[in-house]
Image (spheres, grey):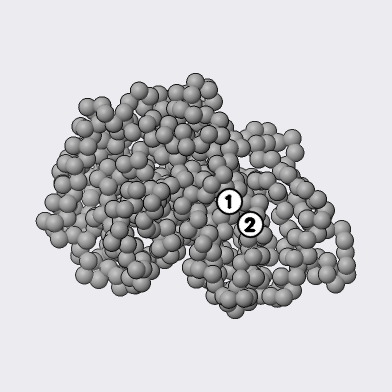
């Protein structure tokens, strides 16, 4: 079975019908399955549906699913609370036989079918893994034989479509790569699968890792308000995890693409120090700041995922710098009292020239952030408010000005793939297929290289900012800096976002995400609450290099002490499924 989108082999989870399949010997099982999409318009038509021996396949899937429910107990499977479930919840349910891995995966697939193209039509999923149910069955067998195979046993992962898998296409959000299968798994995919994870689906992303629209799929929508943007470029993972289409997700952060979608979806998003996680098998944007990292609904789930991802990989030599920097466990240090005695510095100065402190929009976000800072103090932190970082105003200019790495990096990556349909950035632009906004961005990188004198100026500006941050942290004896991930709410999606190169200029107003990638320090965003308009706000912690364990400890204590996350109302529990 080839890679498929959303509505292939989705079983109706109706216990009475499933029992009838076995008890009454009913053979008309095809009615349980939604058909493959036919006559669909681009981009959906790109996701072809191949079904060898469809009746036999459907019968095997239906009877296996029914048998698993009968063995584990239908009532138990139905009583498992899927919405907002954590890794610990799933493992406890598997151990108590309240659910099987296969049933769990099916229920997530049901949610994708119900809400990604139908209902709020969030458009987060590019491809569903055609082998997901088969992998779940294998994990069920392994569990019966010897228990959990690893820390991610039966955990459905949503993977940004910037990361390669051998069994699904990798499009990078572009129609140019529709159907392109690299034939290899990225290092992080290998590590997650070895830990027991199931890559449930690949998520839509901003074209070639920028923004939230792409020629391969259109626009991703925010799970809390589908008229608004999901941030980018890992917007599909962000909206999908918020909507409970999977349990944890993988994003890629060059300038904020993990933390932005996490912040506007009431999620936890961690941008690790660059050498911590291998990027082998991922299309680069700016290698000096590209990093893969976890997105989750809880800090603990993000920490569990990071433990699997982190570590040296000879295929990405930069990870050698992480040797000796990876703790035995990121989870072990999590504690509800983890803020007691810590020292935090609050950055109040906007890092984005578009920030408007006089606007109602800004005031709504600021009210949430002010409450969060008060909560930090109430939970035992010593808060220095404000702290002033020298030359902070140069952060955005320094980040945006680095257009020297991209063409070299993308061309080198594409050269690794003889079957890639496009081989260079210039060819991508000449195709005329890329969305206008992304095409304009790529035009700015053509002909640039790291040999240009301008690149040295960027590196010098980064070092000045890095020294400034370290000096402030040393002078005030700070464990971390704290600030709003965004000073404004996420904006409404423009009707011409796919066709007008200028419509997205305000898509990330109040953007404070660039500080972390510019200076190379890790950052964690956690849910801080909601504005009066009902939109999520993210609070960001920034630490010294390789202090992910510290950031996770701080974020966990804040999360446990406030419990600010709420699931979106647009994607409630399905029917009789809790």
Label 2 secondary element: helix
Q: Is residue 238 visible?
A: no
Position of residue 238 relative to residue 147, above or below, is: above
Q: Residue furthest bottom?
A: 96
The residue at 50%/71% (across/down) is: 88
The residue at 45%/40% (across/down) is: 283
Position of residue 186 relative to residue 548, above or below, is: above
Q: Residue 418: x, y in percent? A: 53, 34
Label 1 secondary element: strand
Q: Is residue 13 visible?
A: yes
**Residue under label 2:** 132
Residue 453 picture quarter: top left
Q: Nearer the viewer, residue 512 or 188?
A: 188
The residue at 43%/31% (across/down) is: 411
Whether residues under marks 1 and 2 lie with C-beta atoms below 8 angstroms apart, the answer is: yes
Position of residue 439 relative to residue 149, above or below, is: above
The residue at 30%/56% (across/down) is: 322
Q: Decide which of tag 1 and tag 2 comes sooner along the chain.
A: 2
Q: Residue 414: x, y in percent? A: 47, 34
Q: Residue 268: x, y in percent? A: 41, 57
Q: Nearer the viewer, residue 453 or 43?
A: 453
- Tell me the crowding category of disc 2: few under 14, some 14 to 19, or many 20 or more residues within 10 angstroms, Cα based: some
Q: Residue furthest left?
A: 475
In the rendered image, which quarter contains the C terminus? bottom right
Position of residue 302 relative to residue 512, above or below, is: below
In this rendering, would 279 be left or right of 85? Answer: left
Q: Residue 34: x, y in percent? A: 75, 50
**Residue under label 1:** 201
How many numbered marks appear? 2
Q: CA distance from mark 1 to mark 2?
A: 9 Å
- Which label number is shown at residue 543? none
């Amino acid at each position: 079975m080839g890679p498929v989108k959303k509505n292939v082999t989705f079983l109706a989870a109706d216990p009475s019908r499933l029992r009838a399949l076995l008890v009454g010997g009913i053979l008309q099982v095809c009615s349980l399955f939604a058909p493959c999409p036919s006559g669909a318009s681009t981009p959906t038509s790109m996701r072809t549906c191949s079904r060898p021996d469809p009746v036999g396949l459907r019968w095997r899937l239906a009877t296996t699913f029914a048998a698993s429910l009968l063995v584990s107990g239908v009532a138990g499977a139905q009583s498992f609370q899927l919405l907002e479930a954590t890794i610990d919840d799933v493992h406890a349910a598997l151990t108590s036989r309240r659910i099987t891995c296969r049933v769990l995966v099916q229920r997530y697939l049901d949610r994708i079918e119900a809400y990604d193209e139908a209902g709020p039509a969030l458009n987060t999923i590019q491809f569903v893994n055609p082998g997901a149910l088969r992998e779940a069955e294998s994990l069920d067998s392994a569990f019966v034989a010897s228990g959990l195979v690893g820390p991610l046993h039966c955990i459905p992962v949503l993977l940004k479509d910037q990361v390669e898998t051998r069994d699904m296409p990798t499009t990078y959000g572009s129609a140019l790569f529709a159907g392109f299968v690299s034939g290899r798994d990225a290092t992080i995919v290998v590590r997650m699968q070895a830990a027991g994870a199931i890559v449930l689906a690949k998520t839509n992303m901003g074209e070639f890792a920028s923004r939230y629209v792409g020629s391969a799929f259109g626009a991703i929508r925010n799970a809390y308000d589908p008229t608004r943007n999901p941030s980018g470029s890992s917007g599909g993972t962000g909206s999908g995890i918020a909507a409970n289409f999977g349990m944890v997700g993988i994003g890629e952060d060059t300038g904020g693409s993990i933390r932005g979608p996490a912040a506007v979806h009431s999620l936890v998003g961690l941008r690790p120090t660059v050498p911590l996680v291998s990027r082998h098998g991922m299309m680069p944007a700016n290698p000096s700041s590209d990093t893969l990292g976890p997105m989750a609904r809880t800090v603990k789930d993000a920490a569990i995922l990071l433990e699997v991802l982190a570590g040296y990989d000879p295929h990405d030599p930069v990870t050698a710098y992480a040797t000796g920097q990876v703790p035995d466990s990121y989870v072990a240090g999590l504690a509800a009292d983890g803020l007691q005695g810590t020292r935090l510095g609050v950055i109040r100065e906007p890092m984005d020239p578009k920030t408007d402190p006089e606007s109602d929009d800004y005031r709504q976000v600021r009210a949430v952030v002010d409450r969060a800072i008060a909560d930090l103090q109430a939970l035992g932190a010593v808060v220095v408010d404000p702290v002033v970082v020298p030359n902070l105003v140069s952060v955005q200019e320094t980040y945006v000005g680095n257009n020297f790495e991209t063409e070299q990096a993308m061309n080198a990556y594409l050269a690794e793939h003889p079957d890639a349909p496009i081989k260079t950035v210039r060819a991508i632009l000449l195709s005329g297929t890329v969305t206008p906004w992304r095409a304009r961005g790529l035009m700015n990188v053509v002909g640039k290289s790291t040999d240009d004198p301008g690149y040295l100026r960027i590196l010098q500006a980064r070092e000045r900012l890095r020294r400034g941050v370290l000096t402030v942290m040393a002078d005030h004896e700070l464990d971390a800096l704290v600030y709003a991930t965004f000073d404004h709410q996420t904006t409404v999606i423009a009707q011409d976002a796919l066709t007008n190169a200028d419509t997205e200029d305000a898509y990330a107003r109040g953007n404070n995400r660039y500080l972390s990638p510019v200076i190379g320090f890790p950052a964690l965003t956690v849910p801080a609450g909601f504005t009066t308009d009902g939109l999520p706000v993210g609070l960001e912690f920034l630490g010294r290099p390789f202090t992910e364990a510290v950031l996770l400890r701080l974020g966990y204590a804040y999360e446990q002490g406030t419990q600010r996350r709420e699931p979106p109302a647009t994607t409630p529990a399905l029917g009789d499924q809790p």
